[in-house]
Structures are given as C-alpha cells and as structure tokens.
Image (cartoon, rainbow, N blue to C red):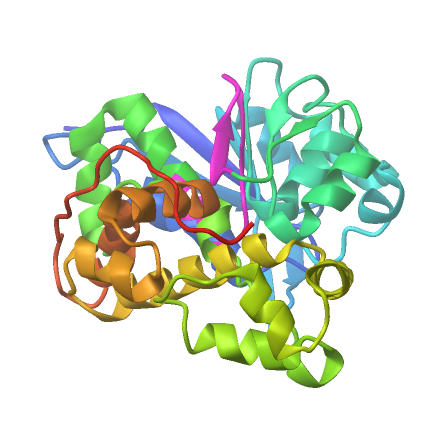
Amino acid sequence: MEPHAPTHRVVVLALAGLLPFELGIPHRIFGRAKDPAGRPLYETLTCGLAPGPVPTDADFAIHVEHGPELLATADTVVVPASYELGPIYEHGRLSAELAAALGYIRPGTRLVSICTGGYVLAAAGYLDGRRATTHWASADHFQQLFPAVRVDPGVLYTDDGDVLTSAGVAAGIDLCLYIVRRDHGAAVANDVARKTVVPPHRDGGQAQFIERPVPEPQLASTTAARAWVMDRLHEPLRLTDLARKEAVSVRTFTRRFREESGVSPGQWIVAQRVERARRLLEETELPMEQVAREAGFGTAQSLRKHVQAALGVSPTAYRRTFRAAAGTGTLSSPDGPSVDAGPVH
C-alpha cells in the first residue's frame, strides 16, 4: 500500500535575518498534526529566495533546499519574522527579488504571518482593508507605514479568512494551533498541543505580556509619594495624602505626577495594583478574595474588573496560563460582576 499523501502543503518562506525559533514553529505544529490513523495531515516545506544558506539573527545560517518556485505548490504560505526587512520596514516596499518570489503564490492560497512577517504581507498589499496584528512593540510603526491595514495591537492573532496574522514570537504557536483547530477540529489541535507541551488555547491578548515598569525614582520628583504608595497598595489611598508626602498642593502634585508618568495618580495606582495582583496570581495559590485584598482592590469582583480591563483576561484565566506552567494546575476563583476599586482619582 502506498503511503498516505497529506492533502495540505504548507510552505514556509525563509528570509535573511529570520529568527530560527519562529521558522521552526510551523514545522513543529503542522508536523505533529495527525489523523485518527496516525497519518500526517500537512506536509511542511521550506523555501528561500534562492536555494542555499539563509542567514539568521543567530550565529548560524540555515541551508534551504528549495527556491521560491516552491511557493507555487503551497496551499498555505507562512512568513516568519526577519530582522533584515530593509526597504519593507523602512518604506513599506518589497524588493524586486521578494516581489518576484511572492508572484509564484497562486490566487486563493492561504497566507499566514508570524510577528513582523506581517510587514511582508502588508507591503505586498495582501492586508489592505483587513484586520491584522504584529508584535506590540512594532504596532504603531506598522500602522503608520501601512495605513490601509486595520492594525489590532491587542490580540495574539487575527483571522481574516484566507489571511491570518500573529503577534510576536510565541504567538505564532497560538496561530498555528488555531489553524489546525480550524482545519481539523479541537481534538487534533489538543493532541498537537499536548505533544508540544503548550496550552491548546491562550486567553486574552498581548497586554498580559507587556511589562509596565515603575519610573526610576531618581528621575521623579514624586519619589516619596510613590514609595509611600508601594508600601500601602493594600490600603485605601487618598490624593491629599500623596500630595502631603511631597509638601505640595493636590493640584501641583497631580500636574507633576502626570508630567512624569503620563497618567493620573489614580491610573498609576490602579496599574501598580494590577501588577501586584499579577505577581500574586503567578507566584501564590491565594484565593481570589485574598489576592484582591493584598493588591488593594478589596473584592474579587473589583479585582476581576481591573485585571480584565488591563490584561484582557480574567484573573482565573491569567493564573491558569502562568501557574499551569509551574505544575499547579487550574485554580478556581469567585470571579463575579464588576464594581469600582477605590477612592483615588
């Protein structure tokens, strides 16, 4: 009996300056997708702008067997990120060589980008009028360079039918698993996720992975008030108390604080409370009511409101994502309706 031939070919386009991790994501995810008889559901191949070595952002090159002609055989084309996009990143234009390569892609081929690979699809016009995403650090530049694209910087990936884009790096795993799930159902995608030792689905978007550093104390004239707040996040806080720590009026304190941080004192305090809640959710097994009290939100309902607004996921989902990796399993919480969180405005 002849071996089963996969019905769907995925071709990954390797460009100079690529990230080896991202290049391997499609091979790992699609390569592990099997039907109930254990036969592969995808064939995943790699091509470059020419056969031969492709430099990476690491201290090694990758040898690619196939040239761009392979794109003509693809059912899905994946473009991972590259740190050497040149005129694409600077001016939103394809090089003649890359434009010729993309010309091999047949109409109707599904197009997928990982991280800044979306720049390639956008420069080729594939994203015009469509919703797309990229790494949060590049989102503003991406939108300015390609105003016809509807950039959503908050999500892990987007699905616009035959064109799909992902956020930075590991979000490519989320997108490829999503594609497997869309193509073949949850059971196949869950099996791939188990074998890859990753969650089959991550809740929320990129906001939960963005660090929110506190300004350097030596650069801020509201240092004493900030330090005082950080020791008392679990207590009710009043703007008059913060201003008193700096020996200025409430109006002067508020103006200085906004000049230094770009937000109001109340917004800053909520952000610090969310950050404390993040740490407690990641590092402890405290019940949600206690996390809420320790972080200064008072109740689990208020905790849920502010974590959801800041991170795009509930406290339960956030804990599940970050604690599961430490082997603690899924923990439950009394998340409920939203209420307000405190007197500082």
How far from the left and from the top, in percent, is residue 212?
55, 63
Residue 191 place in picture, x, y as percent = 17, 41
Using the image as rendered, state which of residue 155 and residue 63 is in the foreground.
Answer: 155
Residue 275 % position (x, y)? 43, 63
Q: Is residue 151 visible?
A: yes
Q: Classify 191 as above or below 322.
A: above
* Residue in the picture at 46% in, 51% down: 343
- The magenta span reads 155-174
Query: Quick check: 296 left or right of 213?
Result: left
At a point 64% along the width and 43% down the height, the residue shown is 117
Residue drawn at (39%, 41%) of the image: 340
Q: At x 19% / y 54%, what residue is drawn?
A: 288
Q: Quadrant of residue 180?
A: top left
In the rendered image, residue 44, in percent from the top left (x then y), is placed at 42, 40
Determine whether 251 is above or below 216 in the image: above
Q: Does the magenta stretch include residue 145?
A: no
The residue positioned farthest toward the bottom in the image shown? 218
Image quarter for residue 335?
top left
Vertical comparison of 210 with 33: above or below: below
Considering depth in this image, is 7 or 27 the residue closer to the camera? Answer: 27
Check the image and report above or below for 74 versus 255: above
Q: How many marks?
A: 0
The magenta stretch spans residue 161: yes
**Image quarter (top left, top right, bottom left or bottom right) of the N terminus:** top left
Q: In this view, does 331 lie to the left or right of 118?
A: left
Q: Residue furthest top?
A: 108
